């Protein structure tokens, strides 16, 4: 959990600090709404890029865990360095491509303008500089996961998150008069430095703490093509997923600045809970690959049942805590009377989404560990085309507002939960 939530924690911390710029208490002013909406939108786009391009993490985890379960770790010696080099190249290309097109994306695809457009572009163009480092860091986390070690990722993430929080207060608010307050750009620089710290620590753990033998060679590993196929299907799946999330921002922006800021806060909370609950997907992923490699049918079934129970239980706890302490949570994230009046309309829908998310993410993890990337891709296509989009587009015509956005997310996640569940039941009988 602690290792998985680092990226949304960076965005949430930035959003929380920016959301309280210049305020000592509850405020009726809308002056900081544009900054909140900008950081929320740009942070979601950064998370989208991480989700899309960091799918090599799940792919390498599946391959390494299956090799670990079948005692074939020697074949990983050259695959891991090749995976790192590949991610470095992809990360630089993605960084350059989005750096020079970010303003166009925010204006034309996400319907931002004015101060929101300016702040979102400034924030994004700083944070994306660290994207290649994040991509390499997360892919190596996948290697650690494959050998059933999540401790190192946790330690690295805690240190990186702590650095980000400290620097947020120094750069954004100018604490201790160390620097002049930098506002939105200060939040971005804090996250960028945290990404550098995490990258350095990850390389250190891989080279000096792990017992994984690495061989650097120009000869392509026999597993590399299979790794790319798994990652490619997961990338297509995640592109579709993030198009759906970006559409929610687009419609929220169309509805107004208050709606955009409210949705930015709620969706960043949703992303935080998603990465939090994804801990069970991470665990289920590693164990599914290990048990598949060992050809242990009974352990595969136990793996799914236990992770589903734990993830759903934790999701209810999260939902309950948010419903009880919603005022305190929102008070930390934003100080604006208009948002405070609007978010209670979305809160019950948000809470309802969490247990459904728990089912979907855990099943995602199991199928990723099994290497069933093509199946997961197809499920995402189906749930988006026949669930999310119809509810969003028809609902926008009949009853436009933030509620319809969250109805579409709920239907989307329901399809992503139940179709894989019944497919696994059918598959395990033939295993």
Image (cartoon, rainbow, N blue to C red):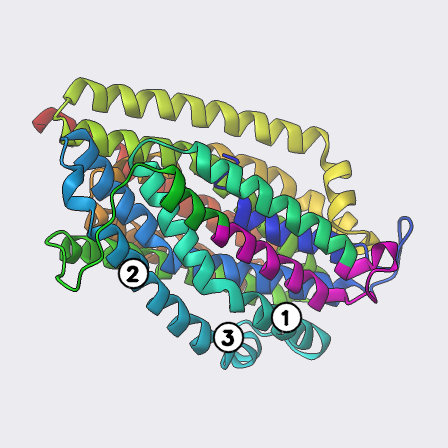
Disc 1 to disc 2, C-alpha distance:
26 Å
Q: The residue tagged with tag 1: helix, strand or loop?
A: helix
Residue that carries the numbered disc 2 in the rendered image: 236
Q: CA distance from mark 1 to mark 3?
A: 13 Å
In the image shown, does 137 or 272 lie closer to the viewer?
Answer: 137
Give the crowd class for mark 3: few <14, some 14-19, many >=20 residues within 10 Å: few
Judged from the image, the secondary structure of the residue bearing numbered disc 3 is helix
**Quadrant placement of the C terminus:** top left
Label number found at residue 109: 3
Q: Would residue 260 be seen by someone viewing this image from the given angle? A: no
Is residue 221 something that shows in the picture? yes
Residue 244 appears in which quarter of the rendering? bottom left
* Mark 1 vs mark 3: in front: 1
Determine the image quadrant of residue 290: top left
Q: Which mark is residue 120?
A: 1
Percent coordinates x, y for residue 306 in the rendering: 35, 20
Q: Is residue 329 above or below residue 186?
A: above
| Front in this rendered view, residue 316 or 415 | 316
Q: Residue at (42%, 63%) from the top-left corner?
A: 243
Q: Which stretch is magenta?
A: 171-200
First-in-chain label (1 vs 3)? 3
5 to 280, vertically: above or below: below
- Kindly check if marks 1 and 2 are in contact, taking CB atoms under 8 A apart as contact: no
């Amino acid at each position: 959990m602690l290792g998985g939530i680092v990226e949304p924690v960076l965005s949430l911390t930035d959003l929380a600090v920016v959301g309280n710029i210049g305020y000592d208490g509850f405020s009726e002013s809308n002056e900081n709404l544009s900054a909140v909406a900008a950081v929320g939108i740009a942070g979601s786009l950064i998370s989208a890029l991480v989700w899309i391009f960091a799918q090599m993490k799940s792919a390498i985890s599946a391959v390494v865990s299956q090799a670990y379960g079948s005692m074939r770790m020697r074949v990983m010696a050259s695959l891991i360095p090749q995976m790192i080099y590949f991610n470095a190249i992809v990360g630089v290309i993605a960084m350059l491509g989005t750096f020079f097109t970010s303003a166009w994306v925010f204006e034309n695809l996400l319907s931002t303008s004015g101060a929101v457009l300016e702040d979102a572009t400034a924030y994004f163009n700083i944070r994306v500089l660290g994207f290649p480092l994040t991509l390499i860091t997360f892919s190596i986390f996948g290697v650690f996961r494959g050998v059933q070690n999540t401790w190192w990722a946790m330690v690295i993430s805690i240190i990186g998150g702590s650095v980000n929080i400290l620097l947020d207060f120094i750069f954004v608010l100018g604490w201790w008069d160390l620097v002049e307050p930098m506002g939105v750009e200060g939040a971005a620089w804090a996250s960028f430095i945290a990404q550098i710290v995490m990258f350095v620590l990850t390389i250190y753990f891989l080279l000096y703490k792990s017992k994984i033998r690495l061989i650097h060679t120009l000869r392509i590993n026999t597993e590399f093509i299979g790794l790319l196929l798994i990652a490619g299907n997961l990338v297509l799946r995640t592109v579709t997923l993030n198009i759906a999330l970006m559409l929610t921002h687009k419609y929220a922006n169309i509805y107004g600045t208050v709606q955009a800021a409210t949705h930015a806060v709620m969706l960043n909370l949703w992303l935080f809970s998603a990465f939090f609950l994804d801990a069970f997907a991470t665990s289920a992923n590693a164990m599914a690959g290990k048990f598949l490699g060992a050809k242990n049918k009974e352990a595969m079934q136990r793996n799914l049942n236990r992770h589903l129970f734990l993830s759903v239980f934790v999701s209810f706890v999260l939902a309950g805590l948010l419903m009880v302490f919603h005022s305190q949570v929102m008070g930390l994230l934003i100080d604006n009377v208009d948002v405070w009046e609007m978010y209670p309309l979305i809160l019950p829908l948000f809470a309802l989404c969490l247990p459904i998310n728990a089912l979907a993410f855990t099943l995602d993890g199991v199928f990723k560990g099994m290497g069933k990337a093509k199946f997961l891709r197809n499920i995402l296509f189906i749930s988006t085309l026949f669930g999310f989009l119809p509810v969003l587009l028809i609902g926008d015509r009949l009853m436009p507002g933030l509620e319809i956005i969250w109805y579409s997310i709920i239907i989307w996640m329901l399809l992503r939960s139940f179709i894989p569940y019944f497919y696994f039941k059918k598959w395990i009988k033939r295993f």
